[in-house]
Structures are given as structure tokens and as C-alpha cells.
Image: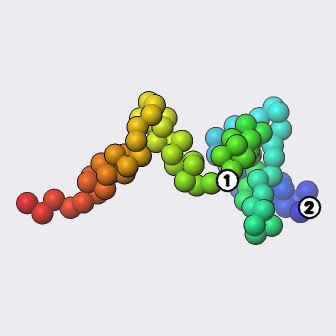
Amino acid sequence: MTLEDYEGILAAQDGGCAICGEQSADGQSMHIDHAAESVRGILCVCCNNALGQLKDDPELMLRAAEYVTLGGFARLDIVRREREQMQEPDTR
């Protein structure tokens, strides 16, 4: 990746992290898809570390989002069942 490529990606992200938008004083990191060997975007150090801690696993990220949204622990089978019920059309 060239400096021009990096600057182009960063400009497309309005100069900030692709997740939080911050223009971090700690610097920016390229977020790499190791399986495809490509750059996903440019992230601040905090967001890049968070994704790494969650092993770039979308299911873990969704579970973390549910945890935060619900204000703590909830059994995911209950959360999923409630979400499915909200998405089912009312046939009455």
C-alpha cells in the first residue's frame, strides 16, 4: 500500500476512524482482513484493538452489542426469540 492509497482511504473516511470517526491523536491503524490479505479501512488504535480483542468475529461483536444495549447479561436465546417475535408479521 502506498502513502497515496492510505491517504485516499483516510480521505474517504472524512479523515477519521472508520468506526468511531475520531481523528485520534494516538494515530491511526490499517485494519487488515488477514484471510483476504486486504485493507478493510483505517481505524483508531482503540477501535482496532477492540476488534482484535473480539477476534474479528461478527457473532462476538453482535453479542457484545446486545450486552451493552441490554445493560448487562441476558441469555441470548431469549434475546433472539424476542427479536424474531418482533420481526414476525402480525397475522391477526
Q: Is residue 34 left or right of residue 55?
A: right
Residue at the farthest bottom position = 36
Disc count in the image? 2
Q: Position of residue 82 (x, y in %)?
A: 30, 48
The colour scheme applied to this rendered structure is rainbow
Helix, strand or loop for disc 2: loop
Check if mark 2's residue and mark 1's residue have beta carbons within 8 Å: no
Q: Amino acid at mark 2?
A: Thr
Q: Is residue 54 left or right of residue 26?
A: left
Against 36, residue 28 (above or below) is above
Q: Earlier in the sequence, mark 2 or mark 1?
A: 2
What residue is rendered at 31% in x and 52% in y?
81
What residue is rendered at 44% in x and 30% in y?
71
Q: What's the distance in space between the residues labelled 2 and 1, CA to CA?
A: 25 Å
What label does residue 2 carry, if any?
2
What label does residue 56 carry, if any?
1
Question: Dot 2 surroundings within 10 Å: few (below 14), some, or many (20 or more)?
Answer: few
What residue is rendered at 37% in x and 49% in y?
77
Q: Amino acid at mark 1?
A: Asp
Question: Dot 1 surroundings within 10 Å: few (below 14), some, or many (20 or more)?
Answer: some
Q: Is residue 59 left or right of residue 19?
A: left
Residue at the farthest left position = 92
Helix, strand or loop for disc 1: loop
Quadrant containing the C terminus in the rendered view: bottom left
Q: Position of residue 39 (x, y in %)?
A: 78, 61
